[in-house]
Image (tube, rainbow, N blue to C red):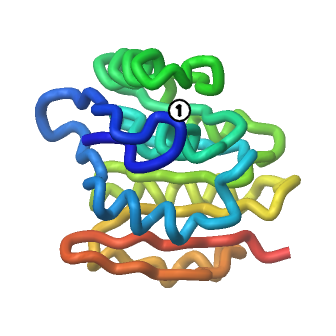
């Protein structure tokens, strides 16, 4: 896995061994960030279920102002820190060993420009996070992106007050782009 574009372009990122994380392929990452056009530059970015940190580091490399990485696996937390040092982006990244749902519950307001989450599949973790987010005040026109399996049902998001603004499907997974209704 590598950084696709920006200041850290082509640098190889470490991943942790095993199936606890599923690093996003370079091709899907490039497609994803092409759809992020206009959202990443100077953004305050939140990477939930951050894994090895590849998405948040890509955002920083492409000009995000800062990124908060939330990950509860200690090996993955160390991996993110190593990747931030390797890419020389550690001054813009904040890595917290935290459960994603608890972290979001603890926020008074949502002041991130982009929230990306790639939780373990088929455990309703994204639904739990979105349920918490639905009860929060947003200070920005936040773009929320969820990576999920192709068969994951997001019909519930309208009842939570979110609109699906884009649904991008790949061979084995998809990205759902959401925004909170005013």
Residue 174 vertical placement versus 80 (above, below): below
Q: Kindly identify the residue that appears in the image at 48 percent across and 72 percent down.
A: 176
Q: Kindly identify the residue that appears in the image at 75 percent across and 46 percent down.
A: 42
Residue 154 vertical placement versus 73 (above, below): below
Give the position of the C terminus as an image quadrant. bottom right
Q: Position of residue 54 (x, y in %)?
A: 39, 40
Residue 78 vertical placement versus 123 (above, below): above
Using the rendered image of the protein, determine whether residue 67 is visible from the camera's viewpoint. Answer: yes
The residue beneath circle 1 is 69
How many numbered circles does the render carry?
1
The residue lying toward the viewer, choosing from 54 and 107, is: 54
Q: Position of residue 78 (x, y in %)?
A: 36, 15
Q: Residues within 10 Å of mark 1 (few under 14, many from 20)?
A: many
Q: Kindly identify the residue that appears in the image at 46 percent across and 34 percent down.
A: 8
Q: Position of residue 168 (x, y in %)?
A: 41, 79
Q: Position of residue 53 (x, y in %)?
A: 41, 35
Give the position of the N terminus as an image quadrant. top left
Horizontal arrangement in the rendering, residue 3 relative to residue 113 (left or right): left
Name the secondary structure under disc 1. strand
Horizontal arrangement in the rendering, residue 148 relative to residue 166 (left or right): left
Using the rendered image of the protein, determine whether residue 100 is visible from the camera's viewpoint. Answer: no
Q: Kindly identify the residue that appears in the image at 55 percent across and 19 percent down.
A: 90
Q: Quadrant of residue 177?
A: bottom right
Q: Quadrant of residue 152?
A: bottom left
The residue lying toward the viewer, choosing from 67 and 18, is: 67
Horizontal arrangement in the rendering, residue 135 relative to residue 170 (left or right): right
Horizontal arrangement in the rendering, residue 111 relative to residue 179 (left or right): right
């Amino acid at each position: 896995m590598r950084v696709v574009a920006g200041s850290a372009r082509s640098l190889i990122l470490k991943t942790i061994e095993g199936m606890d994380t599923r690093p996003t392929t370079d091709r899907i990452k490039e497609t994803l960030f092409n759809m992020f056009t206009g959202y990443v530059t100077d953004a305050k970015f939140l990477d939930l279920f951050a894994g090895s940190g590849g998405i948040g580091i890509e955002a920083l490399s492409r000009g995000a102002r800062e990124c908060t990485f939330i990950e509860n696996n200690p090996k993955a937390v160390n991996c993110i820190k190593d990747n931030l040092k390797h890419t020389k982006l550690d001054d813009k990244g904040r890595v917290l060993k935290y459960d994603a749902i608890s972290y979001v519950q603890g926020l008074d307001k949502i002041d991130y420009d982009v929230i990306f989450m790639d939780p373990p599949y088929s455990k309703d973790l994204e639904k739990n996070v979105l349920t918490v987010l639905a009860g929060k005040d947003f200070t920005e026109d936040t773009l929320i992106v969820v990576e999920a399996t192709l068969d994951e049902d997001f019909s519930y998001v309208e009842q939570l007050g979110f609109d699906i603004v884009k649904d991008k499907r790949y061979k084995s997974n998809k990205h759902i782009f959401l925004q909170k209704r005013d």
